[in-house]
Amino acid sequence: MSINSSNFEQIGLIKVATKAIQKIKEELGDMPEDATKLIHFLNSKKKYELQELDIEDRTEKNLEVRKVLSKRNLMINLDDKCQNMQVTVDRFMTNFKFQERNGYPVPWS
């Protein structure tokens, strides 16, 4: 097995992505749950009821609220990909540790 620079690049990318995921989680907080409730609320009301609440366009409000859900879904997908990349990197590192224990040269020794 030869060292592939993409493995080390993946380690850096995982760190950057993990920070971004944490930032998004903090930004979103409880908004995804609230967004889901708001969509149900908007869809359960009649037009005149929404107008009484100064909501003129149900579709526009729904689209605004769905942006929160899209951001959450993107974050979840990114988190899944990071976890998959981490598994690959961990296997790679385990392989090198095995080689080091058995006396084979490794790039960092």
Image: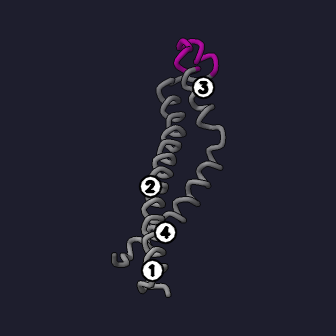
Report the residue at 55% width, 21% height from top: 40
Question: Is 31 located above or below residue 107 in the figure?
Answer: above
Q: Position of residue 80 (x, y in %)?
A: 47, 50
What secondary structure is found at the residue carrying circle 2? helix
Report the residue at 49% width, 79% height from top: 101
Query: Tag 1 or tag 2, which sits nearer the N-term?
Result: 2
Q: Position of residue 98 (x, y in %)?
A: 46, 74
Q: Amino acid at mark 2?
A: Asn
3D distance between C-alphas at marks 3 and 1 = 58 Å
What secondary structure is found at the residue carrying circle 4? helix
Question: Is 28 located above or below residue 4 in the figure?
Answer: above
3D distance between C-alphas at marks 2 and 3 = 32 Å
3D distance between C-alphas at marks 2 and 1 = 28 Å
Q: Give yes or no for contact between labels 2 and 1 (Cβ–Cβ under 8 Å).
A: no
Residue on which the image places disc 4:
11
Residue on which the image places disc 3:
37
Residue on which the image places disc 1:
102
In the picture, which quadrant includes the N terminus? bottom left
Query: Tag 3 or tag 2, which sits nearer the N-term?
Result: 3
Q: Which residues are magenta?
A: 41-53
